[in-house]
Amino acid sequence: MEKGLPQALNHCDVPVNSVVYGPVPSWRLGRSLGIDLLSTEGKTCSFDCIYCQLGITLYPLVERREFVSLNQVKTEL
C-alpha cells in the first residue's frame, strides 16, 4: 500500500469488465474514476504502458471505430 493513501484508493472497486472503473489513485485529484471507451472484453489500445490501471494490452489496434456505445457509458455512470 502506498504511504499516506487509504487502502480503498489502491485498487478498483468496480469489476474489470466494466466500462467505468475505480476509484483509482490520482496524483492531481487524490482519486478519480476511469472510463475505458475501447473495450470490455480485454484491454484494446495502441499502447502498452506499464503504469496503466487496466493492465497489459491484449488487443493492440490502431483503427478508429466505436467500441462502447454512449448509452452503455451513461448506464454505468
Image (spheres, rainbow, N blue to C red):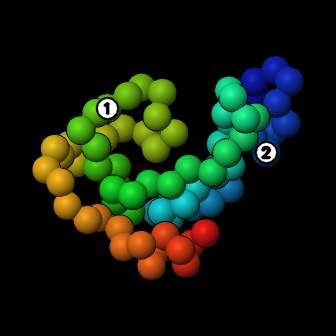
Which residue does the numbered mark 1 point to in the structure image?
48
Q: Is residue 11 visible?
A: no
Residue sitting nearer the eye, 16 or 34: 34
Q: Nearer the viewer, residue 18 or 75?
A: 75
Dot 2: what SS? Answer: helix
Residue that appears at 36% across and 73% down: 69
Q: Name the spot of residue 70 as percent of width and height, x first.
A: 42, 72
Dots 2 and 1: beta carbons under 8 Å? no
Write down the quadrant of residue 7 in the picture.
Answer: top right
The amino acid type of the residue labelled 2 equals Ala
Marker disc for residue 8: 2
Crowdedness of circle 2 by 10 Å Cα count: few (<14), some, many (20+)? some
Work out which quarter of the rendered image holds the C terminus and state it: bottom right
Q: Quadrant of residue 11?
A: top right
**On the picture, is 3 further left or further right than 24?**
right
Identified at 38% across, 63% down, the residue is 40
* Place of residue 17 in the rendered image (x, y in percent of width and height, measured from the top left): 46, 63
Q: Residue at x 48, y 27 (%)?
A: 51
With respect to residue 74, does 6 lie above or below?
A: above
Q: Is residue 25 left or right of residue 76?
A: right
> Which residue type does callout 1 highlight?
Asp
User: Total of numbered circles in the picture?
Assistant: 2
- The spot of residue 57 in percent (x, y) is 31, 41
* Residue at position x 67%, y 45% in the image: 32
On the rendered image, what quadrant is the N terminus found in? Answer: top right
